[in-house]
Image: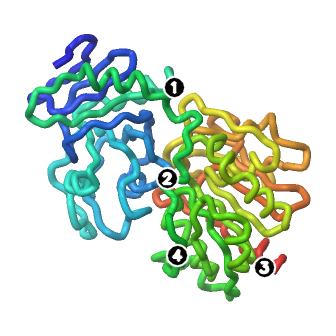
């Protein structure tokens, strides 16, 4: 095994490794599938919701460092999935949890990872990794769970050096649904059922949509038709939507917008009420003339403070993005509505004259706080006004 520039802890014989493109190697214990992956390393500061995080399609081609040490303690179940599988390439965990304990649990995290063919590494100082990512920015890494067999890491390091990273990489169309479908399940706890909502048909363009977004829309009686990311304007208008929702998703927005720009421009020009979240926010902004850029370390966690510039309040939000809308590039007809209190980056916009608004963060949470769930009501009001 390659052992130059290796950091190691006091572990049983290592069965996994995390390899950086500068040659640094961290040895640990393997979990999940026996395989190797190459992706961008990031960190998530959430203290709960690791299953929802792993199954968020926005984490495609990323390896997640969980800063909370006890990941796996509540096991996994079939209700907390945010998609039909794990989309993260792998994960890094501080402590291995052999036994889980929760009345809702149906299986262990290890089995969940194995069943999804996803590798993980434990026994790693995640505080060290978080400080490294905070000071050095996003990192290209390889993660390998090699089990009991000895592994030559040289070839894997060579593959890592030839991977270009997430910039200029469209992933949204890869994780998008291939066929249209309807959604008919609401939230477990119906927060909106005290009001009498009308049913409006909407189209959701799927760039990596989360289930809790669809649940939140259903709770407002939206009749959601989910279409593939590359659906054209004719296919969208055939559904006679009263509103358009642009979902979250992975990858570089500059790469995805090249494939879908005419469609979003036509939606905006037709004055169909439009709401975007995360990647959807970036795509709307690009279509309106703004620019996006890669962030130094990104925002990932369920404790991100955002200032609402409209009513001068603060929301604690759930976020997952490594690209941002360049707030200095916003055209004059665009109003900035939200900013990050961590670094001042853009977190939301609305058009001054057209029924279009979007936010960078995740008002549906899952995991995370519900401070921003009101945005779904704002979308409902916009659709109802124009219906």
Any mark on residue 174, and which? 2
Residue topped by disc 1: 137
Q: Position of residue 318 (x, y in %)?
A: 54, 52
Residue topped by disc 3: 384
In contact (CB < 8 Å): disc 3 and disc 1: no
In contact (CB < 8 Å): disc 4 and disc 3: no
Q: Position of residue 188 (x, y in %)?
A: 45, 76
User: CA–CA distance between discs 3 and 1?
Assistant: 43 Å
Q: Position of residue 103 (x, y in %)?
A: 24, 69
- CA neighbours of label 3 inside 10 A, class few (<14), some (14 to 19), many (20+): some
- The answer to whether 300 is drawn above or below residue 134 in the figure is below
In contact (CB < 8 Å): disc 1 and disc 2: no
Any mark on residue 181, and which? 4
User: CA–CA distance between discs 4 and 2?
Assistant: 17 Å
Q: Position of residue 147 (x, y in %)?
A: 13, 37
In this rendering, the label closer to the viewer, 4 or 1: 4
Quadrant (top left/top right/bottom left/bottom right) for the N terminus: top left
User: CA–CA distance between discs 4 and 1?
Assistant: 39 Å
**Residue positioned 76% across, 58% down in the render:** 357
State which tag comes first along the sequence, 1 or 2: 1
User: Under tag 4, what secondary structure?
Assistant: strand
How many numbered dots are placed on residues in this image? 4
- CA neighbours of label 1 inside 10 A, class few (<14), some (14 to 19), many (20+): some
State which tag comes first along the sequence, 4 or 3: 4
In contact (CB < 8 Å): disc 2 and disc 3: no
Looking at the image, the residue that sits furthest to the top is: 4
- CA neighbours of label 2 inside 10 A, class few (<14), some (14 to 19), many (20+): some
State which tag comes first along the sequence, 4 or 1: 1
User: CA–CA distance between discs 2 and 3?
Assistant: 33 Å
State which tag comes first along the sequence, 3 or 1: 1
């Amino acid at each position: 095994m390659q052992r130059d520039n290796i950091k190691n802890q006091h572990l049983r014989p290592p069965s996994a490794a995390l390899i950086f493109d500068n040659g640094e190697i961290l040895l640990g214990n393997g979990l999940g599938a026996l395989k190797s992956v190459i992706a961008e390393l990031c960190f998530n500061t959430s203290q709960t919701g690791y299953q929802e995080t792993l199954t968020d399609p926005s984490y495609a081609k990323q390896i997640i460092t969980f800063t909370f040490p006890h990941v796996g303690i509540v096991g996994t179940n079939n209700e907390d999935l945010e998609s039909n599988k794990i989309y993260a390439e792998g994960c890094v965990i501080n402590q291995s949890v052999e036994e889980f304990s929760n009345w809702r649990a149906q299986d262990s995290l290890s089995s969940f990872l194995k069943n999804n063919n996803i590798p993980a590494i434990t026994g790693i100082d995640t505080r060290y990794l978080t400080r490294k990512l905070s000071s050095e920015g996003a990192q290209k890494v390889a993660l390998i769970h090699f089990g009991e067999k000895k592994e030559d890491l040289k070839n894997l390091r060579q593959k890592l050096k030839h991977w270009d990273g997430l910039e200029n990489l469209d992933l949204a169309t890869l994780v998008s649904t291939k066929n249209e479908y309807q959604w008919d399940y609401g939230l477990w706890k119906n927060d909106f059922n005290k009001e009498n909502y009308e049913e409006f048909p909407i189209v959701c363009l799927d760039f990596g949509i989360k289930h809790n977004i669809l649940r939140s829309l259903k709770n407002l009686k939206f009749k959601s038709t989910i279409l593939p990311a590359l659906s054209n304007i004719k296919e969208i208008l055939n559904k006679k939507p009263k509103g358009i929702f642009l979902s979250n998703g992975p990858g570089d927005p500059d790469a995805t917008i090249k494939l879908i720009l005419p469609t979003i421009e036509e939606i905006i020009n037709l004055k169909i009420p439009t709401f975007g979240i995360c990647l959807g926010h970036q795509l709307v902004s690009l279509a309106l003339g703004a620019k996006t850029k890669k962030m130094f370390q990104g925002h990932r966690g369920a404790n991100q403070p955002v200032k609402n510039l409209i009513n001068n309040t603060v929301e604690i939000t759930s976020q997952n993005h490594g690209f941002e809308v360049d707030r200095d590039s916003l055209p004059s007809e665009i109003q900035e509505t939200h900013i990050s209190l961590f670094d001042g980056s853009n977190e939301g916009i609305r058009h001054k004259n057209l029924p279009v608004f979007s936010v960078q963060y995740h008002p549906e949470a899952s995991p995370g706080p519900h401070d921003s769930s009101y945005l779904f009501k704002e979308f409902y009001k916009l659709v109802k006004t124009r219906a």
